[in-house]
Image: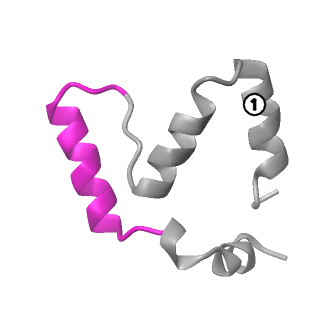
Amino acid sequence: MGTRDVADRLPGFLWQQPEEVVREGWDAVRAGKPVCYTGVANKVSAAAMRPIPGRIGYVLGRTLNPFE
């Protein structure tokens, strides 16, 4: 199974239009922010991972990655 097959199975709310991602990214660059999470799903995921220690977060990310 290829990456496209896996990506096609993810729910639509996890995806953003490229123009929206670019706009949010450029806004972050202009604001001097070194890190930018675009979209609600990514912002919620990032906030949920913040209190988790780094090594555990790494293992969770590797385990829950739908593309591996």
Q: Decide whether the magenta segment is chiefly helix, strand or loop.
A: helix
Left or right: residue 13 versus residue 7 is: left
In the image, residue 7 lies at what x, y percent?
Answer: 66, 73
Residue 30 % position (x, y): 14, 34
| Residue type, mark 1 in image | Tyr
Whether residue 11 is in magenta: the answer is no
Give the vertical position of 19 relative to 52 (above or below).
Answer: below
Residue drawn at x 21%, y 45% is: 26
In this figure, which residue is indicated by the disc labeled 1?
Answer: 58
Furthest residue in direction left, as rendered: 30
Q: Residue at coordinates 49% horizontally, 50% vertically from top-left?
A: 42
Within the image, what quadrant is residue 66 found in?
Answer: bottom right
* Front one among 66 and 49: 49
- Establish if 26 lies above or below 20: above
Q: Look at the numbered disc 1 and give the secondary structure of its residue.
A: helix
Residue in the foreground of this view, choosing between 41 and 23: 41
In this rendering, the answer to whether 51 lies above or below 6 is above
Q: Position of residue 6 (x, y in %)?
A: 74, 73
Label 1: few (<14), some or many (≥20) within 10 Å?
few
Magenta residue span: 15-34
